[in-house]
Amino acid sequence: MDLSEIKAMARRREYEAALRECDELVEASNVAPIEVMRVRASIHAAKRDFLSAVENYKEIVEDERSHQGDYFLGANYAIAQGEMQLALDWLAEAIEIGKRIGNTALEPPSLFYSSYACMELDKLQEARGFLKRAESVEPKICLPIPGDSVFVSAAEMRTKIDKKQIVR
């Protein structure tokens, strides 16, 4: 079975069967091909098993063929799993890679999610700084929070940060 067939299984929500097929592909090659690991992570995320998705991304980002999007997606799964420091580290790497290769498309969402992660870690000044930077690049930024899919605007994020400041 190839990856396109496994992806089709996942779209049909045949998650366990798709994961078994991923394992068979990995075992057959004696190496965890990065493409299979990406598919595996997305299947785990579709099942809302963010812990397993993060574990897959830990392997993916160690591969020399990993790219900016791997760090960004891995960070999204880390946020959904509640691993905010890991998310911050991966978002910083996504931003850095983007600068190196001249692709800044992921910078505004990476900054926005960095703001969210900092807020969750009670690093409120840093959260405000990331949010300000995100807004400077994309003034009307509004994104779903990974794991719960509720869209949050920059103004709403600022309010969340301020409320957290008051509670402290």
Image (cartoon, rainbow, N blue to C red):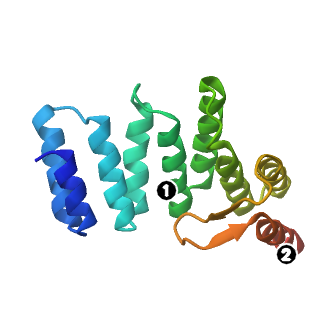
Is disc 1 placed on a helix, strand or loop? helix
Eyeballing the image, is 47 above or below 139?
Answer: below
- Which residue shows up at 78% across the image and 49% down it? 130
In the picture of the structure, the residue carrying the numbered disc 1 is: 77
Closer to viewer: mark 1 or mark 2: 1
Residue located 43% across and 42% down the image:
58
- Quadrant position of the C terminus in the picture: bottom right
Q: In the rendered image, which quarter is residue 98 located in?
A: top right
Residue at screen point 49% across, 48% down? 74
* Residue occupied by mark 2: 167
The foreground one among 98 and 64 is 98
Give x and y (percent) for residue 167: 85, 75
x and y percentages locating residue 11 in the rendered image = 27, 64
Q: Earlier in the sequence, mark 1 or mark 2?
A: 1
Q: Is residue 62 above or below residue 138?
A: above
Query: x, y (%) of residue 61?
Result: 45, 36
